Image: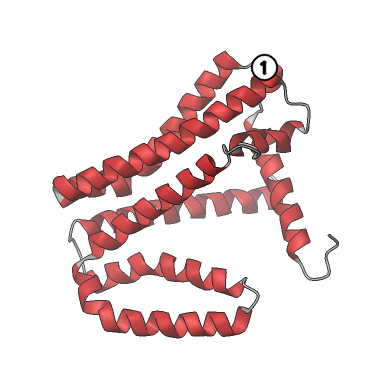
Amino acid sequence: MSDSGGSAAWRTVLAVLLVVGWAVSAHLASAGIGPADLHTVVAVAPMVAAALIAAWHSPWRFPSTVLLALVSIGALAWGWTWLSSHVAWLYYLQHLGTHLALAAWFGRSLARGREPAVTAMARMIFGDTLSERKRGYTRGVTLAWALFLLGNALVSTLLFAFAPQEIWSVHANLLTGPLIGAFFLAEMLVRRVALPPQERPALGDIVRAYRARSGSADLSSKPGAKT
């Protein structure tokens, strides 16, 4: 294995361990197990980090980031007592917000005049040689993802409102990842039946297309890059 391949493998393992660790921590926090202050830090850190990253990439990079950092510190200091006693709400809002945002992204791409999200992903691999059958299939997969995400958000909300908190936490924090993996697997199995072999991308093709797309996006975002 090359050095680059070994480095990529280690990064993948580290990412998986971080995701699993975060999920377990979220479950313990939502179930009220362990130090509340530590769980609150873990809960708010991703939201604050995402907001700061967005501010850093805004046209007013420095002032907006500094202002947001100061506002975040002040808001957390003011509401820390409430936050540390309602940690489950933080994780519920994260879970709900992520699902609704992704569902909106998939759903919005189905609007008239737009290209469905999964169709665009397929075009990254196959170029402009997409058959009518593949375009129809990828449009259906885009709709399926939107409905799956909305359905999981609805289940999470119902469990959070009516079930014991531990039950909701198992679903939201421990089972969401496996449910998404199961949906991926189900879609792969359906794809084998719905599409001929030449129209089914291999996993390696998907990874290479994603890396190529990410690399070109990084280059285009650098100062002085040609447009």
Indicate whether 135 appears above or below 152. Answer: above
For this view, does 202 lie left or right of residue 174? right
Quadrant position of the C terminus in the picture: bottom right
Say which residue label 1 marks.
197
Residue 60: image x %, image y %? Answer: 63, 79
Work out whether residue 132 or residue 221 is closer to the camera in this orientation and state it.
132
Quarter assignment of residue 28: bottom left
Work out whether residue 37 or residue 54 is closer to the camera in this orientation and state it.
54
Indicate whether 56 appears above or below 7. Answer: below
Residue 216: image x %, image y %? Answer: 76, 53
Quarter assignment of residue 87: bottom left
For this view, does 10 lie left or right of residue 221? left
Quadrant position of the N terminus in the picture: top right
The structure residue drawn at horizontal position 34% and vertical position 80%, both measured from the top left corner, is 75
Residue 84: image x %, image y %? Answer: 23, 72
Work out whether residue 78 or residue 33 is closer to the camera in this orientation and state it.
78
Q: Residues within 10 Å of mark 1 (few under 14, many from 20)?
A: few
Circle 1 — which element? helix
The structure residue drawn at horizontal position 67% and vertical position 47%, both measured from the top left corner, is 5
Residue at the right extreme?
A: 226
Q: Amino acid at mark 1?
A: Pro
Residue 10 visible to the viewer: yes
The structure residue drawn at horizontal position 59% and vertical position 48%, both measured from the top left corner, is 9
Residue 178 visible to the viewer: no
For this view, does 149 lie left or right of residue 215? left
